[in-house]
Amino acid sequence: MANTVVVVNDQDQQWLLNCLSATLDPNQEVRSFAETSLNQASLQPGFGAALSKIAASRELQFGLRQLAAVLLKHFIKKHWQEGDQSFEHPVVSSEEKEIIRRLLLSSLDDSHRKICTAISMAVASIAVYDWPEEWPDLLPFLLRLISDLANLNGVHGALRCLALIAGDLDDTMVPKLVPVLFPFLHTIVSSPQTYDKYLRTKALSIIYSCTSMLGVMSGVYKTEMYTLMMPMLKAWMDQFSIILEHPVQPEDPDDWGMKMEVLKCLNQFVQNFPRITESEFMVIVGPMWKTVVSSLRVYIRSSIEGTEDPYEGSYDSDGAEKSLDSFVIQLFEFLLTIVGNAKLVKVISSNIKELVYHTIAFLQMTEQQVHTWSIDANQFVADEDDSTYSCRVSGALLLEEVVSYCGKEGIDAIIDAASKWFDESQQQKAAGSAVWWKMREATLFALTFLSDQLLEAEVSGVTKVRIGNILEQMLTEDIGNGVHQYPFLYARIFSSLAKFASVISNGVLVQFLYAAITTISMDIPPPVKIGACRALSELLPKANKEIIQPQMMGLFSSLIDLLHQASDETLHLLLETLQATIKAGFLSASMEPIITPLILNMWCSHVSDPFISIDAIEVLEAIKYSPGCLHQLTSRTLPYLGPILNKPQQQPDGLVAGSLDLVTMLLKNSPTDVVKAAYDVCFDAVVRIILQSEDHSEMQNATECLAYFISGGKQEVLAWGGDAGFAIRSLLDAASRLLDPDLESSGSLFVGNYILQLILHLPSQMAQHIRDLVAALVRRLQSAEIAGLRSSLLLIFARLVHISAPNVEQFINLLITIPAEGHANSLAYVMSEWTKQQGEILGAYQIKVTTTALALLLSTKHVELTNINVQGHLIKSDAGITTRSKAKKAPDQWTVEPLPAKMFALLADALTEIQEQVLCDDDEQDSDWEDIQEGDVEPDKDLFYLAGATSAGRPTYEHLQAMATAYNENQEDGYEDDILSISDPLNEINLAKYLTDFFINFAQIDKQLFDNLCQYLTHAQQNAIKMVLNC
């Protein structure tokens, strides 16, 4: 096959050659004309075959052939398969397809690897559509090619092609392919005397792709996959062991690449087939440890002590990265998998100390990092803040896994290794090493990365070693070293101190706090100032104000000077430091006139940067809550914002939306006189923005701002403008625009909160508009495309249910009389959406209101509820893995249930989740079932009728107390609308008690209906209800 020659000599082919050559012409007009001509020619029969002939013609120029192959790949994606997402007419004829397939296969043994790669990509593109049904001879051909020892170019082409195809195989193809293909691949991998490292690496990459798919399938076809893999496992583990046995070689990227593929395969074996690899795992433990030790030697010599990794950023002909860094990261990935495996970690448990010791050495800063961060402080801040993925971060994650899975042994190993490296770095320093500080910095980096776990271990008594004592020794030892010589060590000292402040003695803290304050004002390398800022952010809130106060004026002055010079990355850090300083209570009212104008100007100039603008607003918010600063800040800020909001069309992008954010910040938790001052300057402008703007960010922020005006001003809002009628009409006009069903969902996103404030704080004015409001809510709900918007609208319906209590039937009747497109009435539509969405609703307040509203609706036993059927539960498929093609042919199917049964099940789900919190200590802080802080409000007796926080006469149950504790333990909900929802009396509901009372009362009042609804419940739901009934 290597001697196959395709002659290109007819007139059309020559035209195509000339056209391809013209696309490479330096003249832009010539190139454009040629590209247009090619696009037109691609619509003619035979174009794909003509490209294939050129790609296959080995006597032609390399560049033209490669270009033809690339164009052919795009041609195949557009014209090969009718019905495909990227298909464009016309479709390639069957005869032309056969020619293209034949020519491509004949070119897979091309000596030019880039040509071979391009041809392989075209073959793989066709295989997606044609193999195996339309192209049954593809796999036999490729297998013959990879077994032909006389044609190593063909082996390369076949492997490259199989590697591409393997990435697109599904669960029907892989089990058929693996038994046939893997023996051929094993022959290649185990024959270094015949096949070079590149070919062996490519074979390993196919093993990896196939094993990945087998791992996915093992979740469904567990027994079948284990049976398939068992006969091959020992041979592969032995081969992996042989490859890893040889030490990692410096300046040999092919060796790194092959070992990296071995590690990737091992990772898949351990993750997906843990039971069958466990018995064979011991064979690779020794070789793997040799790989760790030898790679560290190479890494230190090449990257840490050397100027750079000479192969960093380089790739092979197939686009695979060749750097030593990527190899070490893969090594850590595999070690992470081992440590995270409860059985395999026992195998290496005796070597945990050595593993931790070597891993910390990998965390040293490379010379490339030192160079980059020294000349670019922004990059240093960005890499530190974002934990940019690298050997350093990957190794730290491995240490974190060691601590998590090895407990006390892991903690002791970390502390022991840190102490050893501290001593060794001392010896290096004494010996005159220029890089002694790198090991010290890496040790501090490791300890800082693990600070939470180390501190918890000390508090809980897991370890008797005092981490504070060790750190004090390190920190005080290094603080005397030259700040200009070792800026990154100084930076790490400050950030380490910030993380471990709780276990550092007060004297040392004060010493370093003074040092950080002094550092901010000195002419020293930026990394040191960055570390000092991090330390100040952590230490100032806990500092003795009387001792530190004399230094504050100088600190504010230094921070202000730095703000004037800061670039975007460092600006973020400086604003955080300034905010922490102000929040700590060090800002006096006399400083406000100096800082506020600076921050306002900074906010204005960076308003298009969401991170910096938010930081600036948070600094202003910290000023707002500083004693004596609120009214000064308000009087200084409003004149700044008024002209912007009153002439929004004349402002640069983002300034209007940002200004609305700033007004909202001023309104939150502010006294009425501040809300009134903002009203006088901004209220009319905010309403106009909602009515006239087409910018969704402006509309969202204006909606939120208007909600806070109502929440803060309540009924007084209507009187402030002098015309209450005009004020309520303005508010309703804004609601009408936001509820317009033709408005894009993004523009209406915060309308739910706004409507909620209207009905809570202006109930008498809204009462006469309830029917129109409900109709508008239904129309908006039907056109809503964002789940968050749908949830917020359903919350309004739930709140209206509560308002209608005790006459909830009247609200049901109202919904029945309002039409809903495509449904019998609005009740049928709203309840179908509500029951589908209830499980997705987030926030303790939202869950309380919607859950208790469902209970109120169900308690009515309204006859119309029984006439409605809604979506039940998902019908599980037994067809194996759901691929995209299967999903198209067989979309998800759901049962249909009577509405009362679905509502009953949702209430049981709510009870179940609360009960689970009692059993899941670790999940309490992250759950949406945490209560939110209660405000100092008087409950409205009318609104609170059936949803009372307590129920007189009900006995106290031990399990109920535990449920309430789980629900109420954390008082922070974390949602942006806390301040708006906190004033709602329904926020005081004890949901655990409410649901318990509901189920007990329901069972007593209508036992027959109760038993009937229980038949629709799962065992878990039934058990949850039984638990409260049996108390």
Image (cartoon, grey):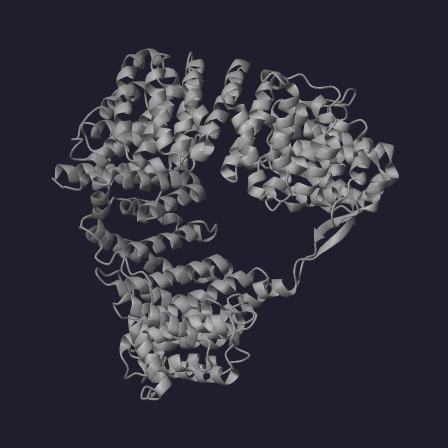
Q: Residue 388: where, in percent of width, then height? A: 34, 45
**67 vs 679: above or below:** below
Is residue 1025 in sight in this rendering? yes
Left/right of residue 220 with respect to residue 243 in the rendered view: right
Q: Residue 825: where, in percent of width, then height? A: 78, 44
Residue closest to the eye, 945 or 1002? 945
Q: Quadrant of the N terminus?
A: bottom left
Residue at the image point whose x is 47% and y is 52% from the top: 343
**432 vs 58: above or below:** above
Q: Quadrant of the C terminus?
A: top right
Residue closest to the eye, 29 or 662? 29
Locate residue 859: give its quadrant: top right
Q: Residue 669: where, in percent of width, then height? A: 53, 20
Residue at the image point whose x is 19% and y is 25% from the top: 522
Left/right of residue 863 with respect to residue 390 in the rendered view: right
Number of labels in the image equals: 0
Is residue 988 in sight in this rendering? no
**541 vs 244: above or below:** above
Residue at the image point whose x is 42% and y is 12% from the top: 627
Locate residue 1014: give its quadrant: top right
Residue closest to the eye, 779 or 965? 779
Q: Residue 942: where, in percent of width, then height? A: 75, 21
Residue at the image point whose x is 32% and y is 40% from the top: 382
**314 vs 532: above or below:** below
Locate residue 599: give its quadrant: top left
